[in-house]
Image (tube, rainbow, N blue to C red):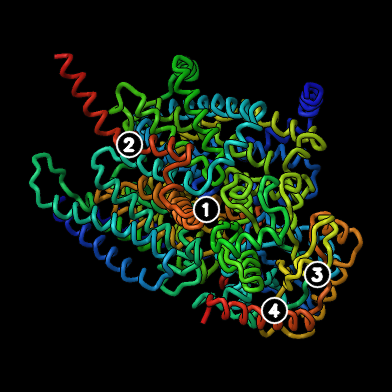
């Protein structure tokens, strides 16, 4: 293995590969930053082009784009309160409030540093712990998926700053939306009102753009200010240094977020969006002042961005070892691998070992390159967005939303979906029902339903449905996590009161 | 806020009733999850409805639209028109048209002719640039309609 | 104040005029496309009604270069995933039948979907078959640690304990589901089908031991052959990539299972265009390098032109309608 390592490092540092990583990082960042363009789309659009390249070049390019686009999503999340990719949803929670306070550059630099460190930790897991982690990923069966999604849904309590009831309503509404289309089991056509296009369900990206982007655009128009943020971008010195020192002083936050990201990544079907939200949730719970979150706490951005970059490597672990993608972009990478005749599994690490190790090492380089590219472009992008007049910015964001919603499935229907949900989301925001829980319900709904129904089928076959749900070790762990997370708001309140009582 | 809450709760309850009725046509396993979610949503909406009768001291003022409603309604109308025109006139043409229109119409402070023309040129340049990038480079093939 | 408002209005009109000017210029530049008389004179769009990276996509990528050469025009691959292919097919039947849009089609998807869904968006007969170029055989597998090592043991246990054995597969009313239904129909055994949305999740479920058996495509079976025992494969003759594995027919169960892939065009496409397309595909698919690549990937080659393909689909439809009706899946 050592010899392979050294030859792979040597082949990484060829001019072509280095150039490809740089190109991939830049292109990935742009894709990620534009709302509506996702990592999955970018890689999918690239697969036909890599057909004529050598496998290693194609993989290096796609890997860099994957890493950088997950990071790039933080830009629009921070500047426009719109996740550039689903993985950046959690970044909006604290990133955007920071931008509103004139700290957009700080937020971007924080996201950058967190992504770099989180991503590097993730690649370490990929390089050295792939076999045991891939075995762990196989232990997740239908009951575990069900409990995992219920755990995910309890995060709603953390996301709802004011009214937990409204948050739960939003979440339930999101779950309802996720059921539009053809049922995963037994295939009944549900809630489609006769439309064939709706048979495919509400696509995540148009829904995401609709719920986050459009209300922002309408909000911009509604408020009379000329520019987007009340406080203009203020030039500050030594931002990078101050951010670095602050993050390094909290190693536990970084490591925990990266571990969560990797673990969620290895779970097939759970992607960066879930990883970031779980990590954010845990950061809130671990903090001594949880009320700071949601108002511009740097820790929130760190938690979200470190975990979503770690998730990239996590999703590659079951992909490379078993051929089972851990997230949608990894599924496209699988297609690219098969296109070049490279079968995941032992063969990939031995016969094609040179290519595979070069690919994994290129991820290290990509994560590192994010730092200069991100910090450099972050400065002028945040200046641009905050200085652009709203009359240009609002239509521009809408324009990008249209492109993004269309580009997923090349379907105008999705654009109408985006618009429709945009208006619903706008009204919802007025009613203080926020988009976060709705989108969470939309994302988790299908995974939850499949887990539930598949487990019931398994239970029927084995004779006891209850046993299937409650007696498996991994399930029990997840049930405990769920219960803890659901009860947390009340526990936290009790702890706070006790602490206040002690201070009197 | 309380009236708004009440209306929202009633609307959601209506959706739940519809969902329950629709689920009767589904096969048993396909109807399970919808029914569970409809019950949960229904229960929560009911709770919202009941709580909306409670007077609370720190009640936030419910403001539907801050300031003048006209710019907002115009903006929504233009966004809908833009989306509808894409299939009719083609993506590039309808975007050039509506993007420029939105920029000009939303302007609230007086601007000189020069500034407006400059802005429209910028808009057109940006639109064409993105169009070429996506349509030609990434082969996303936008709808053509009557024009492009 | 009035002067400013008037100026503003004038400037807005000016702005509109500029925009109109750009419109007209743009239209003029795009020009009217002159349709050549000989087909094909413009690029052909090859629609894949599934996500990029899947089996249909991989095959199309390999066909693309040869097609461009055979047709003398460029071929653009367009992805329209959704509803198991239905979104793409529903859109195809509404597309102009001028031969410039073709689509991949899959058996049994295009047969079953209109049968079991109230409104699939298309009818099986609306998709005019042009050429069928491959079959992916489907096989039944268990883990090496399974107590049943042969198909007989497997079926015997299931007969004695109806519904106790869980079998995974991809999708409801898909090729995998149908294979299981046929197995149940022909042996009288009852299983519990656990569908997943996609091949990869069903394989993951199976490898993790959450389902006891799996119906899977041949390439997944070949890829994991070190960890599994393939009880039977759904081809007519033994499958070279899986040596030593018996076919269902060899085991006494008269069924074949597989996903057939080909291309189709919208209804009303002129015969001459169909001829051109089927000749082009025939040429591409008989090339030795293409055949070698396909077999390496685990596909079984087919070379059915339009008439034969149409008959094949007709027969399959009758077969499936009967099976589904007997099993109570449809009225």
Mark 3 vs mark 2, CA separation in Å: 58 Å
Element under label 2?
A: helix
Element under label 3?
A: loop
Q: Disc 3 designates what residue?
A: C236
**Do circles 2 and 1 both sit on a common chain?**
yes
Mark 2 vs mark 1, CA separation in Å: 29 Å
Which image quarter holds the C terminus of chain B? Answer: bottom right
Mark 3 vs mark 1, CA separation in Å: 46 Å
Give the numbered dot on residue A158.
Answer: 2
Say which label, 2 or 1, has the lower sequence index.
Answer: 2
Please name the residue shown 46% across and 72% down the image: A195
Element under label 1?
A: helix
Q: Position of residue C283 (x, y in %)?
A: 88, 70
Element under label 4?
A: helix
Q: Which chain is mark 2 on?
A: A
Near-viewer residue (A36 or A356) = A356
Q: Position of residue A27 (x, y in %)?
A: 63, 40
Q: Disc 1 designates what residue?
A: A404
* Mark in front: 4 vs 2: 4
Task: Give left or right: position of A55 versus C102.
Answer: right
Q: Disc 4 designates what residue?
A: C316
* Mark in front: 2 vs 1: 2
């Amino acid at each position: 293995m050592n010899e392979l390592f050294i030859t792979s490092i040597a082949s990484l540092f060829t001019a072509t590969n280095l150039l490809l990583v740089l190109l991939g990082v830049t292109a990935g960042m742009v894709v990620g930053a534009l709302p509506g363009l996702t990592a999955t789309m970018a890689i999918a659009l690239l697969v036909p082009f890599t057909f004529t390249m050598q496998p290693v070049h194609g993989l290096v390019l796609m890997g860099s784009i994957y890493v950088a686009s997950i990071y790039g999503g933080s830009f629009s999340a921070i500047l426009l309160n719109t996740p550039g990719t689903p993985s950046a949803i959690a970044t909006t929670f604290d990133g955007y409030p920071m931008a509103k306070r004139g700290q957009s550059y700080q937020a971007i630099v924080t996201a950058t540093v967190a992504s770099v460190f989180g991503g590097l930790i993730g690649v370490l897991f990929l390089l050295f712990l792939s076999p045991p982690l891939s075995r762990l990923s196989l232990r997740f069966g239908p009951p575990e998926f069900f409990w995992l999604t219920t755990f995910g849904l309890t995060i709603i309590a953390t996301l709802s700053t004011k009214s937990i009831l409204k948050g739960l309503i939003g979440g339930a509404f999101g779950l309802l939306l996720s059921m539009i289309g053809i049922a995963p089991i037994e295939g009944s056509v549900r809630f489609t009102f006769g439309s064939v296009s709706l048979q495919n369900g509400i696509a995540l990206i148009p829904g995401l753009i609709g719920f986050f982007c459009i209300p922002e655009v309408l909000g911009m128009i509604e408020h009379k200010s000329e520019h987007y943020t009340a406080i203009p971008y203020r030039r500050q010195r030594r931002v990078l240094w101050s951010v670095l020192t602050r993050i390094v002083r909290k190693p536990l936050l970084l490591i925990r977020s990266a571990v969560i990201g990797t673990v969620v990544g290895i779970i097939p079907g759970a992607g960066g969006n879930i990883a970031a939200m779980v990590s954010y949730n845990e950061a809130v719970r671990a903090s001594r002042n949880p009320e700071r979150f949601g108002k511009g706490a740097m820790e929130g951005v760190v938690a979200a961005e470190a975990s979503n970059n770690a998730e990239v490597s996590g999703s590659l672990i079951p992909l490379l070892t078993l051929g089972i993608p851990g997230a949608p972009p990894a599924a496209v990478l699988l297609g690219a691998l098969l296109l070049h005749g490279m079968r995941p599994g032992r063969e990939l690490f031995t016969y094609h070992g040179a290519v595979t190790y070069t690919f994994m090492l290129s991820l290290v380089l990509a994560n590192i390159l994010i730092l200069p590219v991100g910090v450099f472009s972050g400065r002028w992008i945040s200046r641009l967005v905050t200085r652009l007049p709203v009359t240009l910015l609002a239509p521009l964001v809408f324009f990008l939303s249209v492109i993004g919603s269309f580009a997923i499935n090349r379907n105008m229907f999705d654009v109408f979906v985006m618009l429709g949900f945009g208006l619903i989301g706008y009204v919802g925001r007025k009613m203080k029902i926020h988009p976060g829980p709705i989108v969470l319900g939309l994302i988790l709904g299908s995974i939850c339903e499949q887990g539930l129904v598949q487990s019931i089928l398994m239970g029927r076959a084995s004779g006891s449905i209850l046993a299937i749900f409650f007696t498996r070790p991994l399930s029990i762990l997840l049930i405990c996590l769920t219960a803890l997370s659901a009860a947390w708001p009340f526990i936290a309140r009790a702890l706070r009161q006790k602490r206040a009582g002690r201070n009197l | 806020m309380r009236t708004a809450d009440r209306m929202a709760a009633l609307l959601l309850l209506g959706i739940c009733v519809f969902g329950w009725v629709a689920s009767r046509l589904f096969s048993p396993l396909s109807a399970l999850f919808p029914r569970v979610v409809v019950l949960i949503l229904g229960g929560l909406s009911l709770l919202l409805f009941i709580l909306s009768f409670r007077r609370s001291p720190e009640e936030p003022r419910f403001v539907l639209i801050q300031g003048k409603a006209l710019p907002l309604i115009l903006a929504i109308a233009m966004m809908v028109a833009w989306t509808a025109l894409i299939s009719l006139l083609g993506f590039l043409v309808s975007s050039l048209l509506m993007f420029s229109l939105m920029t000009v119409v939303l302007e609230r402070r007086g601007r000189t002719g020069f500034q407006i023309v400059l802005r429209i040129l910028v808009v057109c340049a940006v639109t064409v640039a993105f169009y070429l990038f996506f349509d030609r480079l990434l082969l996303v093939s936008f709808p053509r309609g009557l024009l492009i | 104040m009035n002067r400013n408002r008037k100026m503003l209005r004038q400037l807005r009109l000016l702005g509109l005029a500029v925009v109109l000017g750009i419109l007209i210029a743009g239209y003029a530049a795009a020009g009217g496309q002159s349709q050549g008389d000989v087909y094909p004179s413009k690029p052909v769009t090859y629609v894949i009604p599934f996500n990029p990276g899947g089996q249909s996509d991989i095959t199309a990528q390999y066909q693309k270069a040869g097609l461009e050469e055979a047709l003398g025009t460029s071929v653009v691959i367009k992805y329209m995933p959704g509803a198991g292919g239905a979104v793409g097919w529903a859109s195809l039947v509404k597309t102009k039948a001028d031969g410039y849009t073709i689509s991949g089609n899959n058996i049994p998807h295009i047969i079953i979907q209109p049968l079991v869904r109230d409104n699939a968006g298309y009818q099986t007969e609306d998709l005019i078959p042009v050429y069928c170029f491959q079959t992916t055989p489907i096989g039944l597998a268990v883990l090496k640690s399974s107590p049943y090592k042969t198909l007989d043991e497997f079926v015997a246990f299931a007969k004695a304990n109806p519904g106790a054995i869980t079998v995974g597969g991809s999708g409801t009313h898909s090729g995998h589901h149908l294979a299981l239904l046929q197995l149940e129909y022909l042996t009288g055994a009852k299983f519990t089908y656990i569908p997943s949305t996609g091949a990869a999740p069903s394989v993951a479920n199976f490898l993790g031991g959450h389902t006891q058996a799996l119906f899977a495509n041949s390439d997944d079976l070949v890829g994991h052959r070190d960890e599994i025992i393939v009880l039977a494969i759904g081809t007519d003759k033994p499958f070279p990539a899986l040596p030593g594995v018996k076919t269902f027919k060899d085991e006494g169960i008269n069924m074949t299972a597989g996903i057939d892939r080909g291309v189709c065009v919208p209804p009303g496409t002129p015969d001459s265009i169909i001829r051109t397309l089927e000749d082009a595909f025939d040429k591409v698919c008989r090339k030795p390098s293409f055949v070698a690549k396909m077999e390496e990937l685990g596909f079984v080659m087919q070379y059915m032109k339009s008439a034969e393909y149409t008959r094949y689909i007709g027969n399959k439809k009758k077969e499936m309608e009967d099976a589904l009706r007997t099993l109570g899946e449809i009225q």
